[in-house]
Image (spheres, grey):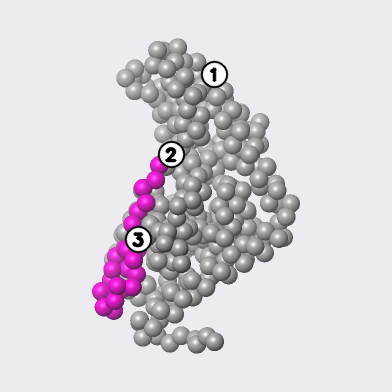
């Protein structure tokens, strides 16, 4: 058994990975593999809490797995949630230790409920959407991680996970579950180039996000049309649009360009066209690299699918062990294995 600390992090299969996903999370996931024992999941159970198309979900799930591999995630660290049904079974058991009040306070449930109500789809508010945070706690605790790298918008769910772990340990008088801690990593917050007052997101529409597996010509067009000034004059403060472009250059490691252009900005000689050209160049270098990697994976898609199923099966054995132990602690029966 490795003496490395364990990390767990997951992503929903909601379409192509965009620049915000990559710089905000996945780039760090790749780097963390060097020093930690990692579990990275494509959580398709979570994707069915909102209205969806089954065929599109299946395609998106495989697509997300392929794209994670193209970004540098090791196949042995990757699993698909629905291939490990123990997640759902543990969710039920942990739900019986969760209070109605603490689940109702989860902001994501409130936000998505409001979203459905505003679109006259209140009849589609599901029990799964309400129970989402408990399943997320099961996703985490089933692998006993030491750390979970999350953004601020997910920190509330990790706090619920810790509460459930502590309640389980207290109720059954056994220090079984770890209370996973937030792993603070250097995450770049990437804003929409079309509206730099908002976080880059697919939900805002195509012009608001950059697909890191997309077309180079489209990427250059998006950067050229990026909003640079907010219209508010303040010589003391860099506008969100300009800062976003500088942050992207730094996050992608082009520090020499960053320092040179920042010097121009400080002296008042910066040309926005030159700044955008540099951003476009570093982004297109990333896009071409990732697209080439993805094309290689897709050329061997059948074999890669089999390998992902196998990695999920290996990871499942650890989930099965946790479930066996939890059932024993809780007084439930479990199937004997040879």
Q: Is residue 184 above or below residue 301?
A: above
* Disc number lying in front (1 or 3): 3
**Which numbered disc, 1 or 3, marks the residue that appears first in the sequence?**
3
Give the CA distance from mark 2 to mark 1. 23 Å
Instruction: Give the residues in magenta.
Output: 160-186
Check contact, mark 2 vs mark 1: CB within 8 A. Answer: no
Q: Name the residue at 56% across, 30% down.
A: 282
Residue holding disc 1: 273
Q: Name the residue at 70% across, 48% down.
A: 296
Give the CA distance from mark 1 to mark 3. 46 Å
Q: Name the residue at 59% across, 36% down.
A: 286
Q: Is residue 158 above or below residue 32?
A: below
Q: Which mark is residue 188?
A: 2
The local crowd at label 3, few if under 14, some if 14 to 19, many if 20 or more residues have their Cα within 10 Å, is many
Residue holding disc 3: 180
Relative horizontal placement of residue 78, taking residue 59 as reference (left or right): left
| Residue 204, position as x, y percentages in the image | 50, 42
Give the CA distance from mark 2 to mark 3. 23 Å
Relative horizontal placement of residue 201, taking residue 285 as reference (left or right): left
Closer-to-camera residue (335/152): 335
| Residue 83, position as x, y percentages in the image | 57, 69
């Amino acid at each position: 058994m490795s003496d490395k600390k364990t990390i767990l992090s997951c992503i929903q299969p909601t379409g192509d990975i965009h620049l915000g996903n990559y710089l905000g999370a996945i780039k760090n996931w790749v780097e963390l593999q060097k020093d930690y024992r990692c579990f990275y999941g494509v959580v398709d159970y979570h994707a069915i809490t909102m209205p969806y198309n089954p065929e599109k979900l299946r395609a998106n799930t495989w697509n997300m797995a392929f794209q994670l591999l193209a970004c540098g995630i090791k196949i042995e660290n990757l699993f698909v949630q629905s291939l490990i049904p123990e997640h759902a079974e543990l969710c039920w058991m942990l739900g019986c230790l969760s209070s109605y009040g603490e689940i109702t306070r989860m902001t994501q449930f409130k936000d998505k409920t409001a979203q459905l109500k505003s679109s006259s789809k209140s009849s589609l508010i599901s029990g799964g959407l309400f129970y989402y945070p408990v399943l997320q706690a099961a996703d985490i605790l089933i692998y006993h991680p030491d750390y979970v790298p999350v953004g601020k918008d997910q920190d509330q769910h990790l706090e619920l996970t810790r509460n459930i772990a502590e309640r389980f340990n207290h109720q059954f008088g056994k220090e079984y579950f770890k209370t996973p801690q937030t792993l603070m990593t250097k995450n770049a917050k990437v804003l929409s180039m079309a509206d730099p007052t908002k976080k880059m997101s697919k939900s805002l529409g195509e012009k608001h996000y950059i697909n890191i597996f997309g077309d180079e010509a489209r990427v250059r067009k998006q950067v050229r049309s990026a909003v640079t000034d907010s219209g508010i004059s303040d010589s003391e403060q860099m506008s969100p649009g300009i800062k976003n472009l500088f942050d992207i250059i730094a996050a992608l490691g082009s520090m020499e360009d960053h320092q040179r252009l920042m010097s121009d900005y400080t002296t008042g000689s910066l040309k926005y066209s030159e700044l955008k050209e540099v951003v476009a160049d570093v982004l297109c270098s990333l896009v071409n690299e990732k697209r080439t990697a993805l094309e290689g994976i897709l050329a061997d898609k059948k074999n890669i699918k089999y390998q992902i199923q196998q990695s999920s099966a290996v990871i499942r054995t650890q989930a099965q062990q946790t479930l066996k132990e939890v059932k024993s602690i809780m007084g439930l029966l479990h199937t004997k294995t040879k």
